[in-house]
Structures are given as structure tokens and as C-alpha cells.
Image (cartoon, rainbow, N blue to C red):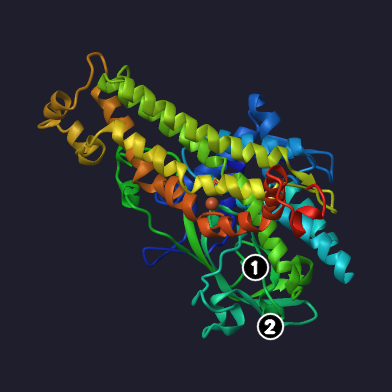
Amino acid sequence: MMMTAEQYEESLRKLKLVVYLFGERIENPVDHPIIRPSMKAVAKTYEMALRPGCREIMTATSHLSGKTINRFTHIHQSADDLIKKTKMGRLMGAHTGCCFQRCVGMDALNALSIVTYDIDAAHQTDYYERFLKYLAFVQENDLTCDGAMTDPKGDRSLPPHQQPDPDMYLHVVSENDDGIIVRGAKAHQTGAVNSHEVIVMPTIAMREADKDYAVAFALPSDAEGITYIMGRQSCDTRKLEADLTDTGNPVFGGHEALVVFDNVFVPWDRVFMNKEYEFAGPLVEKFASYHRQSYACKVGVGDVLIGATQTIAQYNGVEDASHIKDKIIEMNHLNETLYCGSLSCASEGSKEPSGTYCVNTLLANVSKQNVTRFPYEIARLAQDIAGGLMVTLPSFSDFKSPEIGKWMEKYYQGRKGVSTENRFRILRLIENLTLGTAAVGYLTESMHGAGSPQAQRIMISRQVNLKGKQKLAKHLCGIHDEDTDKGHP
Ligand code: SF4
Ligand code: FE
């Protein structure tokens, strides 16, 4: 059964999460003003799935039950499913203007649907069957899962087993008849406190010496021994103000946490990899490729920023200046190029042995590499057009002040007929997206989320057929050597 946004919110209230923010335990994260906008963004994934006009994109037919489910819990059964996933990301980004967090769980489920099957084929294990039971539970209850991959990593030059502190990568401490005990942490966990479940995966390829670190499993997010420490974001305390206008986006936001696993028990039926170290790399690669496709979310946020920029240009009376028009074209060009990348890796997706469709790895990495750059340029152009006022504007309280409000009204007016308050609001939104809480998602997350730029460059270098390209060139200009004589490429 798909949940409504209200049912989702209520379901979170039942969780007994251990959450810290500003050094204090937060008993009720759902209603905490700094955390709540991130919950609202996830809630939107529930609301949109029930909107009649969005069903085609936001829902799918479960290959397990045949029922209609939220696409965020779906295992992609075709390239068309992957294309709809891209469209869903853009749609959600456009309706929230932030990171809506639920994609990580979807990407973890899809990666596991491929790799648990492959491990079984190699080791005669029964991970895939366990996984399918877990998937049925997630789909039936319309759950949000945190896909937890990134370890703290300590000394980056050392593999997991050589770290002076053995907990720099999450690992198995012991096992018994009932399950395993794990210790470690996962960093930068988007939406972790808004999730019912946490799905843990390794963060890098591993060798035999690291086999205790090659572990994948799922747990309820409030399992005993898990602690959430919330990240800070620039301008976050604006969310504590009585009037939220200065936040720029009073309703939605993304939020990350450090998730600590202090000797946490995982029952065997929730373990999806245990010491099969040669599959840690493939699981990372599959999850990363899916999540790099997911960055279509930034196209939707880009839509909002472009809309805000065009609006401030109009409010300022400059929208007809040729350089403004050209900058808006450039912003759209960059944004749609990102969309092309996500769509192309989806439409070039192919079927894995388990039946799951996976994106084209090369194109997914090229797409994400562009995401590490273009939002910064789009943001630069937005700030260029918006003008310095987006960072020197006094507070909304000054605007409403009986004494000085008149000066705000007089000196911050734009084109005749435009409300000064509206001009204020749109500038705050641009500030939010390019410098405030949403800049976490639109900029730095674009850089480092789903892997930092160098991770994509390594994948690109592995995936391109450089020899084949050389053969083509040599063939055309008549070079005959060992390579070209082996035949036409
Ligand atoms: Fe989803 Fe984008 Fe947030 Fe990643 S950054 S969780 S893809 S919305
Ligand atoms: Fe992300």
C-alpha cells in the first residue's frame, strides 16, 4: 500500500531514533524546525506519487507483486523504467528546490538486486532470496531507505585493514548463529533521519585482507546501537526564526548526518554480503552508476534557479538586455545538457543476469562529471544577474518594521508595478540555492555526492575503448602496425 505524505510523517514519529544536533539529543526530529524541511522534502515523494497527473512517472508496477508501487521502491525492469527514473528526479527537484533524499535507497535496492544474484551464482549462497524478501517488505510498506555507502575513510592512503583505527571503514566484529555484529560509521548520509530503514554497503573495492569490511545489510533505522549526528549547513539557524521568509525556501530542504554503528546486531536474513570481498567493487560500481544517473535531481533544482533568475531580471527591468537573455540561454543550455546525460545513460541501459536494468556505466559517469561543474556555472550566472543585493539585503523583519519598513519599501523597489516584497522573496530564494542551506545540495553535493569528480574520471578511463579509437585513426590514415593489422575495429 502506498502511503500518503501524512501517513509517512506519522510513520516516522513511531521510530525511536537517537539523533543529535548542536550537541543535544533531539527527541522528536520530525517537528524540529531545522530537520523538518528535509522530512517535508521526502514527504513530497509520497504526495506526488498519489497525484493523478504524476502517476506515470512517480509509480511503477512491482515485478514481485504486480501491484502499483512508488517508483522509489521499484526495481527497474526496462530502459523505459530508467528513463522514468530520470524524469522523476527532475520533477522532484523542481517541486522541492532541494535534495529529496529518497533516491539513495532506490539506488541501493537496485544495486543489491544485481549483486546479490551475482554472488549467489559464484558462491551458491542465498543472498538474492533474502534480498527479494526484504524488497517485498519495503515495497509493501512503501518505506524510505537510506543507502549508506560512504565510510569516514581515515588515512586515504591506506586500505581498510591497515587503518590505525579499525573502525574507519564499517566492518564485521563477530558473527554467531543468529547474525553478525558490525561497527563503524557512514558519513554524509542524506535523509538518514527521514528513513525507516538503513541499507549499508561497502564504499570501495576490496581485497582478501579487507574481507571483514566487505559487508552489506539492512536494518531498521532505529536499531539498537545506531546514532545520528546531524550536519550543519550555512544559514541553518534562520530556520529557527519565527518568520521563515529569510530562509528563501521555507518548506523544503535536504539534510545529512553522520551515522554511527556501535556494535550493532544484524540478523542473517538482513545480511546481503558477508566477506565476498570480490563483489564489494561491483556493488560500489553499480550503486555509484545508478546514483550518478539520479543526479537528474539537480536539473529540477536548476529549473527553479533559472526560473528565479528570469524573475529577478524582470523585477529589475533588465530582462530584455541582450546579455541577460544570452546568460539565461546559457543557463538553460547547461541545465538541459545535464538532463541529456541522465537520459542517455538510462536509455542505453541494459539487462543484468538478475533481470534488473542497469544504466550505461560510461554515460552515467560522464553525466555526473558534468554535474560537478555545470551547477556552479549556472549559480555563477544566477548571481551575476541577481546582483549584489542577494547578499546585502537586510532581514525580512526590517522589511516589516513599523519604523524602517518604509525605507526598505522605498529603496528596494524595482520596476514599477513589482511588489518589493516579491523582489525580496525571489532574491532570498537565489541566496538559498547558491549560498544557503540548499547550496549544500545544489553545489557541494553536486561536486561530491555519488562520488567526487576524480571517481568519475577513473571510471571514464576504464570504460572508454581507447585502443579501438586508435585503430580507427590509424586505419584512416594508412598506418599499419601490430594493432591495426589485427583487423578492422
Ligand atoms: Fe536524490 Fe539528488 Fe539528493 Fe542524491 S542528491 S539523494 S540523487 S535528490
Ligand atoms: Fe546525493
Nearer the observer, 326 or 234: 326
Residue 127 image position (x, y, % from top left): 82, 65
Amino acid of disc 2: Ala
Q: Secondary structure at mark 2?
A: helix
Q: Quadrant of residue 328?
A: top left
Compared across the picture, whether 26 is left or right of 168 comes to: left
Mark 1 and mark 2 in contact? Answer it, CB < 8 Å: no
Q: Secondary structure at mark 1?
A: loop
Q: Earlier in the sequence, mark 1 or mark 2?
A: 1
Q: Which mark is residue 209?
A: 2
Residue 84 image position (x, y, % from top left): 68, 35
Compared across the picture, whether 125 is left or right of 105 comes to: right
Compared across the picture, whether 327 is left or right of 194 comes to: left
Nearer the observer, 38 or 466: 466
- 149 shown above or below 206: above
Q: Residue at x 25, y 33 (%)?
A: 387
- 144 shown above or below 126: above
Q: Quadrant of residue 251?
A: top left
Compared across the picture, whether 74 is left or right of 259 comes to: right
Q: Which mark is residue 212?
A: none
Nearer the observer, 69 or 170: 170
Q: Give the tally of numbered discs.
A: 2
Farthest residue toward the top?
417
Q: Provide the residue designation for mark 1.
A: 202
Crowd around label 1: few <14 · some 14–19 · many ≥20 (10 Å)? many
